[in-house]
Image (cartoon, rainbow, N blue to C red):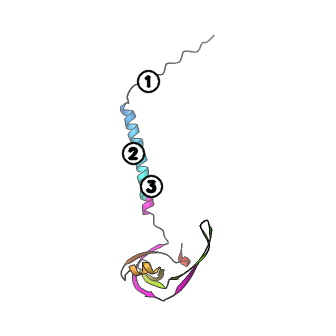
Amino acid sequence: MNTPAPKKPLVIVKGLSRRDILTAVLIMLGILCFIFAAIYSTGTAKNPNMLNGIIREKYKTGEQVRDITVSAQKGSRGVTDKITDSGCYLKIYVSSLDKTYTVMLAESEWERKKVGDKLDFLRPEHERQ
C-alpha cells in the first residue's frame, strides 16, 4: 500500500528580495501611467460642437422674453413669471469654417464682452454633429 508523502512545511522568509521590490515598483509605475494617461485624454478631448471665434459686432434689439417657470417642488410650488432682456447679440467669426454666427447672450455677459475678444460657443442645433 502506498502512503502519501508528508507535505513540505511552508517556509516564511523575513524581508523582501530585490525581485519582490522591483515587481512592486513596476506595478505601481504601471498604475500611475494609466492614471496620468486617463487624465490627459479627458483633458484634451474636444467637443466637435464647440466653436471658437472672434467677436466682430455687438448689438441689441430690445427684445424681451417672458420666462415662466412651473414648479411642484417642496418649498417653491406654483408658477413664477419673469420678464428678461434677451435681445443682446454678438456676431462671431469662426476662421476655421470661414463663417460668421449670431449668438444671443444674457445682458450681463453681453456687457462684459468686447469686439475683438475670443468666445467659445455651442454650434447651432441644425449644424450639430
What residue is pinned by disc 3? 38
Q: Are marks 3 and 2 in contact (CB under 8 Å)?
A: no
Amino acid identity at mark 2: Leu
Amino acid identity at mark 1: Ile
Q: Which mark, residue 12?
A: 1
Left or right of residue 39: residue 125: right
The residue that appears at 45% across and 63% down in the rendered structure is 45
Identify the mark nearer the N-term, 3 or 2. 2
> Circle 3: is it few (<14), some (14-19), or many (20+) Cα within 10 Å?
few
Within the magenta stretch, is there residue 113?
A: no
Along the line of sight, which residue is nearer the eye, 7 or 115?
Answer: 115
Q: Could you say whether the residue bearing mark 2 is in a helix, strand or loop?
A: helix
> Circle 2: is it few (<14), some (14-19), or many (20+) Cα within 10 Å?
few
Residue 96, percent from left and from top:
42, 77
Residue 11, percent from left and from top:
45, 22
Q: CA distance from mark 3 to mark 1?
A: 39 Å
What residue is pinned by disc 2? 29
Q: Quadrant of the C terminus?
A: bottom right
Q: Is residue 112 above or below residue 8?
A: below
Amino acid identity at mark 3: Ala
Q: CA distance from mark 1 to mark 2?
A: 27 Å
Residue 56, percent from left and from top:
39, 84
Within the magenta stretch, is there residue 45?
A: yes
Q: CA distance from mark 3 to mark 2?
A: 14 Å
Left or right of residue 123: residue 113: left
Left or right of residue 111: residue 9: right
Q: Give the extent of the magenta segment.
A: 41-67
The residue that appears at 53% across and 86% down in the rendered structure is 64
The residue that appears at 40% across and 50% down in the rendered structure is 33
